[in-house]
Image: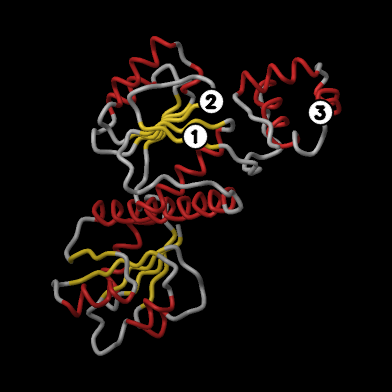
Amino acid sequence: MKILIVENEIYLAQSIATKLTEVGYSCEIAATIKDAMREDRYDAVLLSTNISGQNFYPVIEKHKNAIIILMISYISNDTVTNPIKAGASDYIQKPFMIEELIRKLQHLTLFNSLKKENRTYKEYVNNLFESSDIKAIDPKTKLPILIKTSFQKHADAVVFHYSVEKKEPFVFISLSNPNAIEKIVKTPYNELLYIVDLQNIKKSDKAKIFNLIEDRRVIISTTDTTESYEGIEQMEITTDSKVFDRSDILSIDDYVKYVILNFQNKFPDTELSKKLGISRKSLWEKRKKYGIAKKK
């Protein structure tokens, strides 16, 4: 990490630079605001707010993409509140222990990294689902709710949109994970849970899951649209939306189901069954199994 130390007390600046260098940081010193306006880019700026007669706000603007920690002698609107509003990240009061400064640098570095990571994930998810024509969960719906859909990404789109609308993150749990029940139990009662892969567990385990999520803020999904459930709000998604990526590896059942749903109105049954490598009778049986009604 490259750090600029803006401090007119040269001995203090040198002392800070020496200690930070010892733990692996690269440091440069600027004794005046003019020196701090150099074109070099820094990961962090340690900015003294008591450089006599000099306006330090241009430094905040110049290095707005860096971590800026104010080094202050006392707390006031002029030394802390206003500079932070202008873009500074945090402050540390003189005199301070170098360990405290290092802790702040590490914390802010991690915080910025997580912000960038979160922004990347949000952009990716928005791009993934932006073209999906999926109905939303009614905001007035009382959770828990079960989403039944032929394709997992249909449910994913619904839940991500719900999370954005509610401005609330969720805890993701797959029932294919052997520790799923433990995770459900350990998740705080008031947190939003998104549980997937209900179709992958035994009937006895399903009953246990439904008991665990009763009266909790849970959205649970299954790709088995043929099984019926009682005692829980349900939402069934039937759509021709191509939400899932063509690079996904589907189970044979999921693939057959997808082809029937999306191509039964484009090809006659004779041709559709031939393309699937099955008889017309098998095609009829699969429609019955999946609960697919042929559109007139």
| Horizontal side of residue 3 vs 248, given as left or right | left
From this view, report whether residue 296 is shown above or below residue 213. below
Inter-mark Cα distance, 1 to 2: 8 Å
Report the number of discs: 3
Q: Which residue was labeled with disc 1?
A: 236
Q: Quadrant of residue 291?
A: top right
Q: Quadrant of the N terminus?
A: bottom left
Image location (x, y in percent) of residue 231: 33, 24
Mark 1 or mark 3, earlier in chain:
1
Query: Is mark 1 in CB contact (under 8 Å) with mark 2?
Result: yes
Image location (x, y in percent) of residue 94: 18, 66
Image location (x, y in percent) of residue 210: 33, 21
- Residue at the far bottom: name it: 53
Q: Quadrant of the C terminus?
A: top right
Residue 189, labelled with which disc?
Answer: none
Work out whether residue 151 or residue 247 is closer to the camera in this orientation and state it.
151
Q: Which residue was labeled with disc 3?
A: 272
From this view, report whether residue 209 is shown above or below residue 259. above
Mark 2 or mark 3, earlier in chain:
2
From this view, report whether residue 171 is shown above or below residue 125. above
Query: Is mark 2 in CB contact (under 8 Å) with mark 3?
Result: no
- Please tell me how crowded label 3 is: few (under 14), some (14-19), or many (20+) other residues with Cα within 10 Å: many
Q: Amino acid at mark 3?
A: Leu
Q: Residue at x 53, y 54 (%)?
A: 123
Q: Which residue was labeled with disc 2?
A: 225
Q: Amino acid at mark 1?
A: Glu
| Horizontal side of residue 38 vs 246, given as left or right | left
Secondary structure state at the residue bearing disc 2: loop
